[in-house]
Amino acid sequence: MHQTLLPFLGACLLIAASPGPSTVLIIRRSLVGRRDGMATVLGNETGVFVWGVVAAFGLTALLTASRLAYDAMRVVGAVVLVVFGVQALRAARRLRGSAAAGVGETGDAGGAEETGDARSAPSARSSAWASYRAGLALNLANPKAAVFALSFLPQFVPAGAPKLPTMVALAALWAVFEVGYYACYVWGVHRMRRLLDRASVRRRLEQISGGVLIALGLRMALEG
């Protein structure tokens, strides 16, 4: 097993470094605050672990065997991406309206009007929970994540090792590794907070992330 871990972690690094919808959402929610960014990461990695466990039981094979099931999930995933993209564009519009009205630099990616540590504890918990749900929903609504887990994890099961517990353990390691990797994104956004909190910069980032998420959603909906 120890001979498998290094190649497996290397593959996990390449996967995490590949930009995708999860990366966009994590960065976007990190603009709200570190708590929201990490909650999004944890939600996304919960989805990674869930798909790994489902793949270990062979259930994701149903998606590859049933075109109808795959297409239905693909449409749901596309809708989720478009909804998140529209939310980002609406947040950008609110920021523009606030700037025009001379109201500070507030507004966030999920609809709250408070940022960082200035929020009350109940508001911060509610926002973090919303971020967790967003990360989880984005991952679970992506059929490609399910099919990828099915094809990825079995390659690293050592010969003679029990398949089910080994794949579950690898799925857990995959999720934990990505938590650490994406935490660097959250930390980086926080370190750049003084620049990113400027209304003009924040608005542009919301516009870019919204456009990217909508484009990815449309691509997912239209792909064969």
Image (spheres, helix red, strand yellow):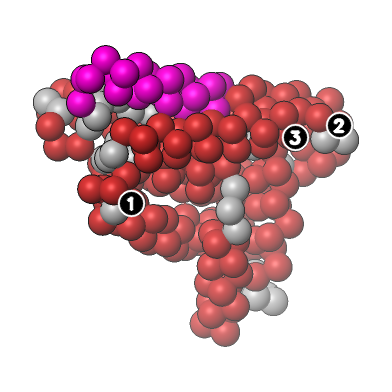
The quarter of the picture where residue 185 lies is bottom left
State which quarter of the image contains the C terminus.
top right
Measured in 3D between alpha carbons, the distance from the residue under mark 2 to the one under mark 3, in whole angstroms, is: 18 Å
Q: Nearer the viewer, mark 2 or mark 3?
A: 3
Amino acid identity at mark 1: Val
Amino acid identity at mark 2: Arg
Q: Position of residue 156 (x, y in %)?
A: 65, 70
Amino acid identity at mark 3: Arg
Q: Position of residue 32 (x, y in %)?
A: 30, 36
SS for dot 2: helix
Q: Earlier in the sequence, mark 2 or mark 3?
A: 2
x 35%, y 17%: residue = 97
Q: Is residue 101 above or below residue 203?
A: above
Residue 221 part of the magenta-drawn span: no
- 93 or 179, which is in the foreground? 93
SS for dot 3: helix
x 75%, y 34%: residue = 219
| Pointer 2 residue | 67
The magenta span reads: 83-104
SS for dot 1: helix
Q: Earlier in the sequence, mark 2 or mark 1?
A: 2
| Pointer 1 residue | 189
| Pointer 3 residue | 219
Whether residue 53 can be seen here: no
- 164 or 211, which is in the foreground? 211
Measured in 3D between alpha carbons, the distance from the residue under mark 1 to the one under mark 3, in whole angstroms, is: 28 Å
- Prevailing secondary structure class for the magenta stretch in the rendered image: helix
